[in-house]
Amino acid sequence: NAGVMQNPRHLVRRRGQEARLRCSPMKGHSHVYWYRQLPEEGLKFMVYLQKENIIDESGMPKERFSAEFPKEGPSILRIQQVVRGDSAAYFCASSPRGSEKLFFGSGTQLSVL
Amino acid sequence: SQQGEEDPQALSIQEGENATMNCSYKTSINNLQWYRQNSGRGLVHLILIRSNEREKHSGRLRVTLDTSKKSSSLLITASRAADTASYFCATDAGGNEKLTFGTGTRLTIIP
């Protein structure tokens, strides 16, 4: 059973471009979470999704950021018109229904030039 | 606001010694979890303790929870070089099945 898969591992974008981060949860996991981590800091919650539904997006900036978890395919975190402050590691985690434990991917390191 | 605050922020000990990290939180919880993060990698779940439990063991790990003080501690006994990592506590106080993470303790084991 493969773990949580995130790609790309590293993503470089220029200011104003769009960044798309992908996350394939573990098989059988219906819950997906996105977190952001700045250097030397903890993880900050961004959004929690179930298939085709956004359950909690209280940690998502109101503008430029969006997330989806379609019926088929990976979850996507999309950042439009990136700025230097978006540079961070973005982690996806998944869990099966009813589980309190999260399984994390290896993250996507976004660098905005 | 950050729910969990770990201390110390950084800890260096000799291999074979015990390492203790602490976590404080602000609001009521159903459970508290500890995760480990190796440099450049995702977090790995270590142990979960429920609000009605006071202590839990898993291998060389011992976790305590004091809900009256809103604090938890993680003890790693007989440390090894491979234990070098950052350790985070996480609580479910944020609701909606999401975890809120602390700021972490960077543990370095000196061979």
Image (cartoon, coloured by chain):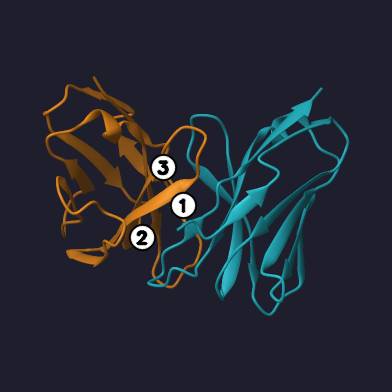
Q: Secondary structure at mark 2?
A: loop
| Residue drawn at 49 percent across, 34 percent down | B41
Which of discs 2 and 1 lies nearer the camera? The answer is: 1
User: Label 3: how many residues lie within 10 Å, few (<14), some (14-19) or many (20+)?
Assistant: many
Left or right, residue B71 beside residue B93: right
Res A103 label: 1
Q: Secondary structure at mark 1?
A: strand
Picture coordinates of residue B32, whole percent (x, y): 60, 65
Estimate the spatial distance between the alpha carbons at disc 2 and disc 3, rounded to whole Å: 13 Å
The answer to whether residue A39 is above or below residue A25 is above
Residue marked by disc 3: A105
Residue lying furthest front: B1
Which chain is disc 3 placed on?
A: A
Q: Position of residue B90 (x, y in %)?
A: 55, 58
Q: Which chain is cyan?
A: B
Q: Amino acid at mark 3?
A: Gly
Q: Which chain is orange?
A: A
- Cβ–Cβ below 8 Å for labels 2 and 1? yes
